Image: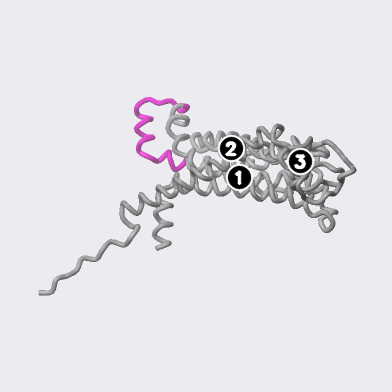
């Protein structure tokens, strides 16, 4: 009788493989988390990091190419581009964070309430969200910002007005799914009030997906704020804001390209960091996704 050789399990498909992938995801999350924290801290303390006054004009060095004195060159008014990019990080990043925070809280609250209570309130609020979703987002934001007269806060309000329905939809669908779970029925039988059921049981179980969506949305909102500023409906000159800076320098792309490339690179790097952190956070909070990705790659 021939001896049958036992086949070795496929590499990476056992418990050890899952642990390796989990540890790898944790390491990536730590790296991108450090980059994100550094970006947020640099934006918060941008005033102290600028080598020059970002608003000081010196026509004697106007449109100067990047060099030792001005690493990213100067604009047409002789303002140091590196200082303006650093100073603009606070407005560009934290205005996007403010928008996402507002729409996340508002949309999640509406979705939780509609999903749990149901009835005519759910119908009315969801139809209102359908109206907001029926319009192209940026076009609607342009209209709202135009009515409000422009300015960075007008851009924030306009984007917040169009951003909440997505979170309401996510929170509502997740709440409806949680309502069918056995643990929630047991909590109801134990005498928990509706408020406790929502905030102690449902919300913690849906917070992961909402958090990931919010982190990924920061980059999108940053680009949309920059777009509104580029079109003149966001930050107003001489405020240092990346979209507004690109708008000011768009006519000089062929003669002094660094004026528009510097803030454009800042937007690219910032959005990439937020998206990489959000993608890794999603993988970390969803072990099944990490496992499936590992199987597909083998």
Which residue has dot 1 on it?
Answer: 217
**Which quarter of the figure is the N terminus placed in?**
bottom left
**Residue at the extreme bottom:** 1
- In the image, residue 111 above or below residue 278: above
Which of the two marks, 1 or 3, is nearer to us in this view?
3
* 234 sits left or right of 130 in the view: right
| CB-based contact (under 8 Å), mark 1 and mark 3 | no
Residue at 32% from the left image edge and 52% from the top image edge: 16
Please provide the residue range marked out in magenta.
Answer: 176-195
Q: Earlier in the sequence, mark 1 or mark 3?
A: 3
* Most common SS among magenta residues: helix
Circle 3 Cα neighbour tier, 10 Å, few/some/many (<14 / 14–19 / ≥20): many
Residue at 77% from the left image edge and 52% from the top image edge: 258
Q: Earlier in the sequence, mark 3 or mark 2?
A: 3
| CB-based contact (under 8 Å), mark 3 and mark 2 | no
- Mark 1–mark 3 Cα distance, whole angstroms, equals 25 Å
């Amino acid at each position: 009788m021939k001896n049958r050789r036992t086949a070795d399990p496929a590499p990476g498909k056992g418990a050890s493989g899952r642990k390796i992938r989990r540890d790898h995801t944790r390491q990536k999350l730590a790296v991108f988390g450090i980059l994100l924290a550094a970006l947020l801290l640099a934006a918060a303390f941008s005033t102290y990091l600028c080598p020059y006054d970002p608003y000081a004009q010196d026509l004697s060095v106007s449109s100067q190419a990047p060099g030792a004195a001005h690493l990213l060159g100067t604009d047409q008014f002789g303002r140091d581009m590196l200082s303006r990019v650093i100073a603009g990080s606070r407005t560009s990043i934290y205005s996007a964070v403010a928008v996402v925070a507002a729409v996340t809280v508002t949309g999640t609250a509406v979705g939780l309430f509609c999903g749990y209570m149901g009835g005519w309130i759910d119908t009315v609020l969801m139809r209102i969200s359908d109206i907001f979703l029926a319009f192209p987002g940026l076009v609607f934001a342009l209209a709202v910002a135009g009515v409000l007269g422009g300015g960075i806060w007008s851009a924030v309000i306009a984007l917040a007005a169009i951003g909440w329905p997505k979170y309401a939809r996510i929170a509502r669908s997740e709440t409806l799914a949680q309502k069918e779970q056995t643990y929630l029925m047991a909590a109801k039988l134990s005498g928990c009030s509706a408020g406790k059921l929502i905030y102690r049981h449902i919300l913690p179980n849906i917070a992961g997906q909402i958090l990931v969506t919010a982190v990924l949305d920061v980059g999108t909102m940053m680009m949309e704020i920059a777009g509104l500023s580029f079109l003149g409906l966001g930050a107003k000159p001489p405020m240092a804001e990346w979209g507004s800076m690109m708008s000011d320098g768009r006519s000089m792309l062929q003669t002094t390209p660094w004026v528009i490339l510097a803030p454009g690179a800042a937007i690219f790097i910032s959005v990439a960091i937020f998206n990489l952190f959000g993608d890794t956070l999603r993988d970390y909070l969803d072990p099944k996704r990490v496992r499936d990705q590992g199987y597909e790659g083998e």
